[in-house]
Amino acid sequence: MLYWLLYLKLFHYFPPFRIFRYLTFRTAFASLTALFTGLIVGPLVINRLREFQISQYIREEGPKAHQKKAGTPTMGGLLIVISIVVPTLLWADLSNRFVWIAVFATCAFGAIGFADDYTKVVNRRNLGLTAKAKLGLQVLASILVAVALIAMQNVGIYSTRLQVPFFKQFQPDLVVDRLLQHPGLWPLAFLPFVGFVVIVLVGSSNAVNLTDGLDGLAIGCTVISAGALAVLTYVSGHATFSTYLELQRMPQVGELTIFCGAMVGASIGFLWYNAHPAEVFMGDVGSLALGGAIGTVAVMIKQELLLPFIGGVFVIEALSVILQVGSYKLRKKRIFKMAPIHHHFELLGWSESKIIVRFWIASLVFALFALTTLKLR
């Protein structure tokens, strides 16, 4: 909105407004806008959540130290979503389709989380939507994102080819070309791509959701992951950098740098209130929205296979749950004292603050490794 007003409309009358054409400038302002939106609006949201008695219910089988957190306002993820979407709409070029897909994914997954959180509040217990309903809605949102990207591929501004880390010449296409030759079978040609997008987005959103178990843990890791995505997004849309790094150059994805910058600012703003001891929890509305946003950006900039490194801690948390459940079902034995794995370390005697900071450090190491792979090709 401001890009349209200050640059496209007023630049000819006031030449200094040309600074708004620069992506780095608008990304910085989007980050600051998101940060101050979170800091200023935060107390209002927290007080309103308290007024409506929207508080967290702690599961009884968890670490006993968590019982004292019962009653802490939840659904603070509404603040995160607002702090991402509003600055993006203010500073991004709204004619860019990638921006709208990112905003849609954030709001769609956030809405699913909102429904889950609201159900928990109404039922006054730590049980929201059924697993099938929650998963079904996530799959539906992911399919809509995939369909939008296929439409963009058909007009030549997106590619369904994968970028494989370390192998610059190996770029498999997830669309089956030979099926496109048969009019009756062409929808089947896109099934591998749609399925892949569903796996990435659903996996990403649930991984962040599982990580959100300690004060500031998930949101701190999100700051790092979103920052890494901002770098990857910028170089993917930059002519010189993308050529030098031998990436698929997609000029329009550069505008997503503003979205990623807003995600960084919004996450830092929320961390101000979510740091231990937390004044508010993000709830599923925040964790699913952030996970959906991270996964969607990774798909759009063709860095899906780097996502396990960009969000390394999220992946480890999700894997710990999968291994724990699988082991118990197959062997009736548990691998960890409790899953997700951050609870395992709690039961080993680590303090909550120590676990959080060490996981942040691990997240930073993973993100830096992901960035180094750009040249190791």
Image (spheres, helix red, strand yellow):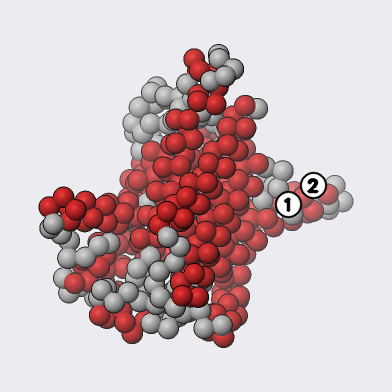
185 above or below 125?
above
Residue at 44% across / 30% down in the picture?
Answer: 192
Q: Amino acid at mark 2?
A: Leu
Tag 2 near tag 1, CB within 8 Å: yes
- Depth check, front residue: 58 or 280: 58
On the image, numbered disc 1 is attached to which residue? 3
Residue at 56% across / 50% down in the picture?
Answer: 105
- Depth check, front residue: 73 or 275: 73
Ranked by sequence position, the earlier of labels 2 and 1 is 1
**Mark 1, secondary structure of its residue:** helix
Residue at 70% across / 48% down in the picture?
Answer: 94
Image coordinates for residue 121, horizontal then vertical, percent: 48, 75
Say left or right for 43 vs 340. Answer: right
On the image, numbered disc 2 is attached to which residue? 8
- Depth check, front residue: 171 or 367: 171
Image coordinates for residue 287, horizontal then vertical, percent: 45, 61
Q: What distance separates the C-alpha of mark 2 from that of mark 1?
A: 7 Å
Say left or right for 142 vs 331. Answer: right
Residue at 36% across / 33% down in the picture?
Answer: 165
Give the class, few, some or many, for how many residues have Cα within 10 Å of label 1's Cα (few <14, many ≥20): many
Q: Amino acid at mark 1?
A: Tyr
93 above or below 222?
above
